[in-house]
Amino acid sequence: MRASKEPTGPATGRRISGSAASLAALAALAGLAGLAWAARNIPAALGGRLAGARAERAARSPQFRDGTFHNRAGTRTMVPAPDRNLFQELIFGKQKRRPTAPVPLVRPAAETGIEPTRELNVVWYGHASTLIEIEGRRVLLDPVWSDRCSPSAAVGPRRLHEPPVRLDELPRVDAILISHDHYDHLDMATVRELTARQSAPFLVPLGVGAHLDRWGVPAERIIELDWSQTHRVADLEITCTAAQHFSGRGLRRNGTLWSSWVVAGEHRKVYYTGDSGYFGGYAEIGAEHGPFDVTLMQIGAYDRSWPSIHMFPEEAVTAHLDLRGGLFVPVHWATFNLALHDWSEPVDRLWAEAKARDVRLAVPRPGERVVVDDPHPVDGWWQGVA
């Protein structure tokens, strides 16, 4: 019987190469499958588009012309565009854009025995996500609980701290307000879970309802408003007010409107900026709807390359004064790395400007309840983790 022989020489090399090629092909297929799995929700996350009655209503808006929404007449808005120096700075810049230690989180305490008719508290969950407790009612602003503010769960800006509470731990809310459709303010997964867990209506600027439609929010829970329009929820009057910004979740821009919000009870009033550059509309809103007991002001993600769509902290203080605001509570910082400044720079600049201009300021940790009539003194907590 002839003994078998192991292949030698070139034949061995061919067999080894064939095995390596098979493994490489399998790895490539696995990689493609992984990419497909990670990208499976992207088309839905991009949201819906204006069509039908919603498009007809948008076309009647004073803010809508030539197929898109616009800022106020005479306002030149610079929208960030790809820039070689910007990309270079993002990769090689020396800014400390992340905290060096964990951001301290606070589990919101039980409500105290404040007279409901005068109650006014704010619970900031991080970035722009905030709960307003006003006269026994609750209003949730721009809730984003996902790990990334992106259409993809695999790429995009990732949270720098966990949400201080889970969505299933939120109390029952009376209204959910959305300022605009950018991913750090409108998140598909969060909207879907809130749709299942809560019964509150979503109040949104014109056109944003198309996204909610696609994500399964019932039509009767979608309230779309133009600037200066008011909708009553329980005992609250909620007014959609102007902002200076832009919108878009894909390649198309400004197919939906952006806004700020006024939340007014019988005795107390709150203003939330959404995202906005500094503009003359703040003084007008303050004259028409103010004074406000508290303003929730955007202070982060600014840059000299886009000065007209995000305020610098000093401009936010000026806007607060224009609005006739009482207590200033900063939002839109700490949670996502969206600009080139140091992580703590927005609130450092804000604190200095507030002291220089004698503005009442509260800077809560994520999850910490601010009692508007008796806020804790600013203690610089962020400096220990910056």
Image (spheres, rainbow, N blue to C red):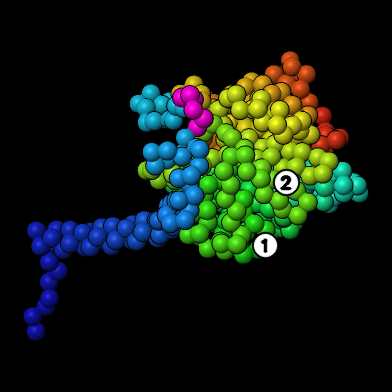
Q: Which quadrant would residue 318 be assigned to in this image?
A: top right
- Secondary structure, mark 2, is strand
Mark 1 nearby-residue class (10 Å; few <14, some 14–19, many ≥20): some
Which residue is identified by label 2?
Answer: 237
Left or right of 269, for residue 25: left
Which residue is identified by label 1?
Answer: 199
Seen in the picture, residue 76 relative to 375 is either above or below; the reply is above
Q: Residue 104, can we see it? A: no
> What is the span of residues highlighted in magenta in the rendered image?
71-76
Q: Amino acid at mark 1?
A: Ser
Left or right of 137, for residue 307: left
- Secondary structure, mark 1, is loop
Q: Which mark is residue 310?
A: none
Does residue 72 belong to the magenta stretch?
A: yes
Q: Position of residue 228 (x, y in %)?
A: 62, 39
Q: Which residue is found at the position 85% from the left and 35% from the top?
A: 373
Q: Which quadrant would residue 229 be assigned to in this image?
A: top right
Seen in the picture, residue 333 relative to 218 is either above or below; the reply is above
Q: Which quadrant would residue 123 be assigned to in this image?
A: top right
Q: Which residue is found at the position 64% from the left and 20% from the top?
A: 314
Viewer-nearest of discs 1 and 2: 2
Q: Quadrant of the C terminus?
A: top right
Q: Position of residue 311 (x, y in %)?
A: 58, 26
Judging depth in this view, the residue of 327 and 239 nearest the camera is 239
Q: Position of residue 36 (x, y in %)?
A: 36, 59
Could you tell which of marks 1 and 2 lies nearer the N-terminus? 1
Mark 2 nearby-residue class (10 Å; few <14, some 14–19, many ≥20): some
Q: Which residue is found at the position 82% from the left and 29% from the top?
A: 377
Seen in the picture, residue 63 relative to 314 is either above or below; the reply is below
Q: Which residue is found at the position 77% from the left and 38% from the top?
A: 269
Q: What is the total number of numbered labels drawn onto the structure image?
A: 2
